[in-house]
Image (cartoon, grey):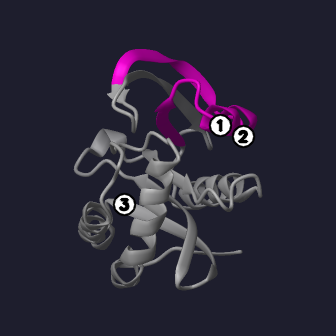
Amino acid sequence: MNVERPDAARLLELTGTLADLLTDTVASGASVGFLAPLDRTAALTWWTERCADVAAGRLTVWTAYEEPSRVLGTVSLALPAGKPNSAHRAELVKLMVHRTARGTGLGRRLLAVAEEAAAADGITLLHLDTETGSPAEHLYRTSGWTEVGAIPDYAANPAGSLRPTTIYYKRLAAWP
């Protein structure tokens, strides 16, 4: 499996296959910010809008694929823009693995790639939120992430039911 960090132009080329990944993720019940059924056009629009954030340095995206025309996984880091007191941290967002690739270690690999790149870029703290009770929680716990707590009724899952979210963080290094 190849993992790449596309620039904005390459991300734009990948929006079709990333839209397919996003619609599959939502259809399989993962809570990644969308309600089911997610229209492919809406997924295309969402990914296309991310290109400006990548170009501006506010978002870093990694994609995983066996063939360049079919992305099977992705993860992103969102950087706080314009906050001098937050330059040391980033939010891990949209870790997605196509249901045909789940259980292969791809999610763990993408998580490690994002963590290593963040550390190399001087990021010392990562944080994320995920649906409480989701399979993703096992990945984060076994990858050294620390649970902070849960917020009730935080977001609707793809079926439209309000669900709690659990906040996690991971220190990558000590602040200088």
Distance from the alpha carbon under mark 3 to that under mark 1? 21 Å
136 part of magenta stretch:
yes
At a point 53% along the width and 24% down the height, the residue shown is 132
Q: Is residue 26 visible?
A: yes
Do the CB atoms of the residues marked 2 and 1 lie less than 8 Å apart?
yes
Q: Is residue 176 visible?
A: no
Relative vertical location of residue 29 with respect to residue 122 in this rendering, above or below: above
Q: Nearer the viewer, mark 3 or mark 1?
A: 1
Q: Helix or strand or loop: what does disc 2 sit on? A: loop
At a point 32% along the width and 39% down the height, the residue shown is 85
Task: Write the start and end of the magenta stretch as one range.
Answer: 125-154
User: Which dot marks residue 140?
Assistant: 1
Q: Helix or strand or loop: what does disc 3 sit on? A: strand
Q: Which residue is mark 3?
A: 59
Relative vertical location of residue 13 with respect to residue 108 in this rendering, above or below: below
Q: Is residue 26 left or right of residue 137?
A: left
Q: Helix or strand or loop: what does disc 1 sit on? A: helix
Q: Is residue 81 left or right of residue 37?
A: left
User: Which dot marks residue 143?
Assistant: 2
Give the amino acid type for the residue marked by disc 1 in the picture. Tyr
Spot occupied by residue 82 in the image (x, y as percentages of width and height):
22, 50
